[in-house]
Every structure is written in C-alpha cells, then in structure tokens.
Amino acid sequence: MNVAVRLRPSATRARRLRLAAGAAVAFAAAACALPGAAQIHRSVDAQGRVVYSDQPPTAGAAKGAVAVAPAKTDALAGEWVVASATMDGRAVMDDKIIGASWTFKGGELTLKTRQGDSQSYAVRTEAGGAPAAFTISPVPPSKERGGTMIYERTGDRLRVAFMDGFAARPADFEPRPKQVVVVLMPRSAAVGAGYATAGPGRDACALLRKAGAEALIAAAWPANPKTIESAPTAASCRVEGATTRVDLVLIPASSRALLDRERAKEVRDMPQWAVKGTVEDEPALGAGAFVVKRGTSTVFMALKGETVVRIGFAYPPDQQQRMVEVTRKVIAAL
C-alpha cells in the first residue's frame, strides 16, 4: 500500500544536485582524495598568473611574484556538517549530500562526504555586498568548477546558496529554480553516524511516538508496529504495520514559499494520478496547511516556524480526524 510521501528526490534531481557544484555538495565517485593536512600555497607570478604549489614561494621565483594572503573567513571558520539541502525549493535526502563536512581553514575549503570522497578549494570572500558571498576555486590538479556562493550565519547555523552549475550569483536564499540551498551546523553539534540533526526536538521517531503514531497503527492492525528511521537523517521516520503506515519528514524552510510550492505541485500533478484524489485546505494545522487525499493515502503538510512538516498515512480514510490529531501533536511538539 503506497503512501504519497517522497523521502528522496527523483534520480534526475539528485544527479543535478551532485553536478551542481562539482564536489561542492556531493562529490563524484572519481573525486580525488587530498591529504587533509597538506597546505597549498597560492601566489601570483610576474605575468599575473595564479600559481598553486605545496611549497612556499622561494627567492628564486619569477621577479615580481607576490604571495597572496589567505582570505579572511572568520565567520565561516571551523568544521561544518550538512544538516539539510534543497534544490528548486524541494528537499533533498541524498546520503552523499546530507552529512558531508565543509571545513574552512586558512583560506581553504575542504569538502568530504560521509563515504570519504574529498576535494579542496581556495576561498576568497567578497568585500561588502549583501548578502555576504565568497568564491571558490578548485585546488590543482582538480579540474572541478568553481564559482560564487552567498552565505548567512545565524548563531550555530550557516546557510549557503549557489546556482546549478554556478551559472550566476544568487540574490537570496528563497526557493528558486536551479538554486541550491544548504544548511550546515558545527561538527560539535552533530550526532549519530557523522551527520547533524535538524536541531533540538527534531528527532522524527521520538515525535511520532509522542504523538501516538504507534498506538494509531496498532489500533488498525493488532500487532506490534515497527518503527524505523527511513532516511539518512534523524529528521525522518516511519512507523508501519502489516497494511498501515505513517511517514514523517521534517524539511527546513526559510519561508512559507516552500509549503506553497509543494501544494502547487500536488495540484499540478493531480490529473496524472492513477487514483482520483483531492488537495484541500487543512486550517486546523495552521496557515497554508493542506491535505492530499488519494485512495487510502492521506498526506498532511504544514509549516511550524522554519520547518515544513510532511506526514503521510496509509490508513483508512474515514479516520481522518485521528490522523489530524496525530499530525497536530507532532506540530505542537516541534
């Protein structure tokens, strides 16, 4: 029995995101692993050409060569972990992206996936401008593409945005076609197998238990329900019985635009549904909240603060009020 909850992006979207910045978010399998302790020196020769080397410039260097000081990246300094990512305004739950580390140190950015692939970039911050921005240039011998990213740090959260293929400099962090937005947290805040949670109180399985999802499943199917973490972050969970299921995904969102975008897509795709259904307002769950009904599948989406809650049920549709109550409790607990 299918629940209309997309825990992962389509293969095309995932592939586009991996290619969006070369190794900036997800690294290709053939990415070169560079020693984390190696120091790359950047200088400019007499002809104005940028030169990278693992040795500092010497007195015998071409006349006029000038050493370039590392960019100041105080607001970025340290090791960060990707807690969430969106592309085209839609959540991405790819395990080559979620949990990747970004380390800013000495004018250099080193990115490493949970699978161990890594790549290094020289970093140059832009002076002035809003929002703040920096450019990355791959450290030779890498031939990965570089480009400009904008960033915003609020406490222990760092948001970075860039365009697919670095086609342009992003104007802001709002959901836009071909724009990637990554939310990072300090490594010190990361938990579990090398990735960060979406924040305190965001353990999806704990939220479902507290809301009574297991009891709901047990009532429909008198057997011990099974609770599993169904994606590579603690921000998603599934509770299932033999013929019933509840899926919860917590999606970081900078505004209501992501929620409205999801609704518009459901309405647009409605004519293609094999089973007829409806998209309706669900004001009991807050402004902009809606419910998608399709056969025995019911999906609720709502916004709480900076989190979009997507909770789907494979459950008898005449029990909608019980499903609303579970959803309401999840939202209240955030």
Image (cartoon, rainbow, N blue to C red):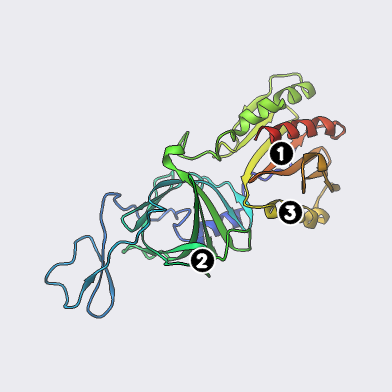
Spatial distance from mark 2 to mark 3, Cα to Cα? Answer: 26 Å
Q: Quadrant of residue 61?
A: bottom left
Please say if 42 is above or below 301: below
Q: Is residue 48 left or right of residue 151?
A: left
Give the mark nearer the N terminus: 1 vs 3.
Answer: 3
The residue indicated by pointer 1 is: 311
- Residue 298 horizontal/vertical position (percent): 79, 39
* Disc 3 residue crowd, few under 14, some 14–19, many 20+, Cα 10 Å: some
Residue occupied by mark 3: 260
Q: Which is nearer the N-term, disc 2 or disc 3? A: 2
Count every numbered label the image shows and give the total. 3
Q: Quadrant of the C terminus?
A: top right
On screen, residue 102 versus residue 46, left or right, reads: right
Residue at 63% of width from left, 49% of height from top?
253
Amino acid at dot 1: Ile
- Residue at screen point 76% across, 41% down: 299
* Cα–Cα span, label 2 and label 1: 33 Å
**Residue 141 appears left or right of 205:** left
Label placed on residue 258 = none
Label 3's element? Answer: helix
Which image quadrant for residue 329?
A: top right
Q: Which of pointers 2 and 1 lies earlier in the amino acid sequence?
A: 2
Cβ–Cβ under 8 Å for marks 2 and 3: no
Looking at the image, the residue that sits furthest to the left is 60
Question: What amino acid is labelled 2 in the image?
Answer: Gly
Residue ID for mark 2: 165
Q: Is residue 241 visible?
A: no
Measure the C-alpha gap from mark 1 to mark 3.
16 Å
